[in-house]
Amino acid sequence: MTMSGITQGARGTHAGMLLWALIVGLSFPAVGLMSEGLPPLLLTAIRFAIAALAIGVLVWRTPDRWPSLPGLLLYAVMGLCLAGFFGAMFWAAHRATALSMATLYVSVPLLAYCLGRGLGVENPAGRLLAILALGAIGALGLALAESGATLDGLQFGIAEAAFFLGCVASALYPVLTKWGLAHGWLSDRAALRTFWSLVAGGVLIGLLGLAMETPRALAAMTLFDFLLVAYLGVFSSGVTFWLMQRATAVLTPGAVTAYTYLVPFVSMLLLFAGEPGRIGWQWLPGAVMVVLAIALLLRRAPSTPSRWRAAPSS
């Protein structure tokens, strides 16, 4: 592929990840509309199942729809990463403060970069590290603004340690995808990679939910709840996973996960739309740093080793 083709592919991928951040940011209000008392892990498994069905219809007739044995094993590990993250997040949600979890979550892009370096899918990139650090500080600033600019909720215990391990698992997901693509274990079609990782993750999360939650609690779901789960399944799981898989074929794991810094920025804009009285100067430093980090990321040339570059796949 020519350098101009790589650059055009990277631009389209960055645009897709901007859409990813918007969809993820808009998903949180939708989750808040669901009835209380529903089992979150089992709901996540249902979301993944709906997303896998939607994508499966599109990819089922493709000639390479069945993964190889090494690919299937890798999808299982990737599914374990998803199960580990969601399991840790839901377990820690009632045991750790929101500020502590937000603070730990900003480490995901830096973790992805370090893990990617360890597996050889990231080049040494001081500029990318600086961009990730800037975005992390900005996202942390937004988390502090949300908490009232106080550090009272910042703590570290067993719940926070468990959530941090979940963050490591989340960071490992795009790294394993990139590694699998580099070794030819995974399909070059983003939709197929999305489908199989959703299947593997959904099965493992469902098993975790059956072990930790009460399945009969799902009987309390209303029609509105089901429609919300269907929306979240198709868009917040299916479309966002496809966008991330598509981006991972072009960008490095650190660059892909850097877009998580935009999620609290989108949440901030939604908060201002609903509660204009919350607008204040305390939001400005974090917002500026996040926007600057993403702007620098958009201007950064692709740095993936040439033998691993690929055009965005469908």
Image (cartoon, rainbow, N blue to C red):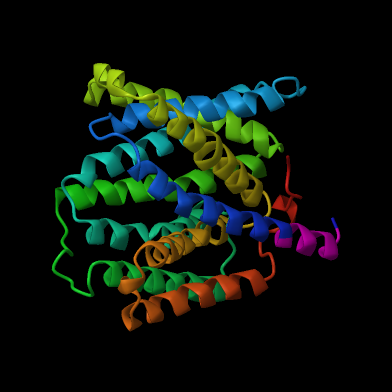
| Magenta highlight range | 2-11
Q: Is residue 206 above or below residue 187?
A: above
Q: Whole-percent x and y of residue 189?
A: 71, 36
Q: Quadrant of residue 270?
A: bottom left
Q: Quadrant of the N terminus?
A: bottom right
Q: Is residue 220 above or below residue 289?
A: above
**Residue name at image x 55 percent, y 70 percent:** 294
Q: Whole-percent x and y of residue 65?
A: 69, 23
Q: Whole-percent x and y of residue 243?
A: 61, 47
State left or right for residue 282 relative to residue 112. left
**Residue name at image x 37 percent, y 42 percent:** 31
Q: Name the magenta segment's main secondary structure.
A: helix
Q: Quadrant of residue 135?
A: bottom left
Q: Is residue 104 above or below residue 162?
A: below
**Residue name at image x 64 percent, y 57 percent:** 251
Q: Whole-percent x and y of residue 162?
A: 24, 46
Residue 5 within the magenta-colored segment of the rendering: yes
Q: Quadrant of the C terminus?
A: top right
Q: Is residue 226 visible?
A: yes
Q: Is residue 185 visible?
A: no
Q: Quadrant of residue 143?
A: bottom left
State left or right for residue 106 relative to residue 26. left
Of the pair 99 and 211, the residue shown nearer to us: 99
**Residue name at image x 45 percent, y 59 percent:** 263
